[in-house]
Image: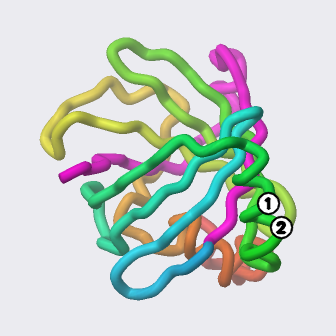
Amino acid sequence: MAQEIERKFLLKDDRWRAQVTRSATMRQGYLASDASCSIRVRVAGDVGYLNIKSATLGVARSEFEYVIPVTEARELLDLFCRGRCLDKVRHYISRPPHIWEIDAFEGDNAGLVVAEIELTSVAESFARPEWLGLEVSADPRYYNVCLIDHPYAAWPAASRD
């Protein structure tokens, strides 16, 4: 079974920006989501993806992802994801053996910046960069699928960590 092991964090400050090696603009939308899974289409630069992910809370989830033609991904977004899309810029930071992905959200989620790291096991250790803040891996508010229906702009100021 395909599995994603990913931890999410907020950021203390902008020191990470000086370490970015590349960035990609992304638009993603949800074809379906319920208590068991989400089905997402994403355009990242010139590449399209279809993704199916379990709706499990925590750092480990089942995930299946497939590259699809970018023209088909754009068509799926236009035809089936109206109103269920989000935009972000993903910045990559290499900290061997890991790559940090920093998502800076746009639109109704502007102002939210989240760092993610993918691991090979739940117990895998990793170096914590100096700019890393509070872990939010188990907080569903920070899941992209949840940001569609409950965007960051609508959160009460007191609940923004």
Q: Is residue 101 left or right of residue 135?
A: right
- Asked if the magenta segment contains residue 93, the reply would be no
Which numbered tag is attached to residue 87?
Answer: none
Query: Residue 51's x, y, as percent?
Result: 49, 57
Left/right placement of residue 81 relative to residue 161 reads right
Nearest the viewer among 144 and 51 is 51
Magenta stretch: give its range: 1-30
Magenta stretch contains residue 15: yes
Residue at 60% over, 38% down: 102
Q: Which mark is residue 75?
A: 1
| In the depicted structure, whether residue 40 falls above or below residue 9 | below
The residue sitting at the bottom extreme is: 35
Magenta span dominant secondary structure: strand
Residue that label 2 marks: 78
Circle 1 residues within 10 Å: few <14, some 14–19, many ≥20: few
Please tell me whether residue 156 is drawn above or below residue 25 in the rendered image: below
Residue at (33% x, 15% y) in the render:
97
> Residue 14: where, in percent of width, then height?
70, 33
Element marked by disc 2: helix
Please name whichever residue, 138 or 79, is drawn nearer the observer in this view of the structure.
79
Q: In the image, what residue type sits under mark 2?
A: Asp
Q: Residue at x 66, y 78 (%)?
A: 158
Please indicate whether residue 135 sits to the left or right of residue 149 in the image: left
13 or 141, nearer to the observer: 141
4 with respect to 103 (left or right)? left
